[in-house]
């Protein structure tokens, strides 16, 4: 801003929102319904894999706990 007052407002910058109401987030769909269903289906599949992995980790921990318990009790 080499011309004039550096604190003068610029005509290229607007400090107010555009005219008219903005569309609600629910009204804008960025993906078609078929793709949303694919997302939901893949999320269900991923959730099932996560549950199986968590159960496996729990079972490994339980087995290790029982091994330590057995070795301490003997």
Image (spheres, grey):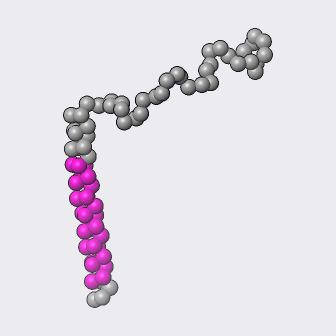
| Residue 14 at x, y percent in the picture | 61, 20
- Name the quadrant containing residue 41: top left
| Residue 7 at x, y percent in the picture | 75, 21
Q: Nearer the viewer, residue 9 or 16?
A: 16
Furthest residue toward front: 20
| Residue 16 at x, y percent in the picture | 60, 25
| Quarter of the figure that contains the N terminus | top right
Q: Is residue 59 above or below residue 69?
A: above
| Quarter of the figure that contains the C terminus | bottom left
Q: Is residue 54 above or below residue 21?
A: below
Which residue is at 32% across, 31% downward?
A: 29
Which residue is at 31% across, 79% downward?
A: 68
Q: Nearer the viewer, residue 70 or 51?
A: 51
| Residue 28 at x, y percent in the picture | 36, 30
Residue 5 relative to residue 53: left or right: right
Q: Nearer the viewer, residue 44 or 51?
A: 44
């Amino acid at each position: 801003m080499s011309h004039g007052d550096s604190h003068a407002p610029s005509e290229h910058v607007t400090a107010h929102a555009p005219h008219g109401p903005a569309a609600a987030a629910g009204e804008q769909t960025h993906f078609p319904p078929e793709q949303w269903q694919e997302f939901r289906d893949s999320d269900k599949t991923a959730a099932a894999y996560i549950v199986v992995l968590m159960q496996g980790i729990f079972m490994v921990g339980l087995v290790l706990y029982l091994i330590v318990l057995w070795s301490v009790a003997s």
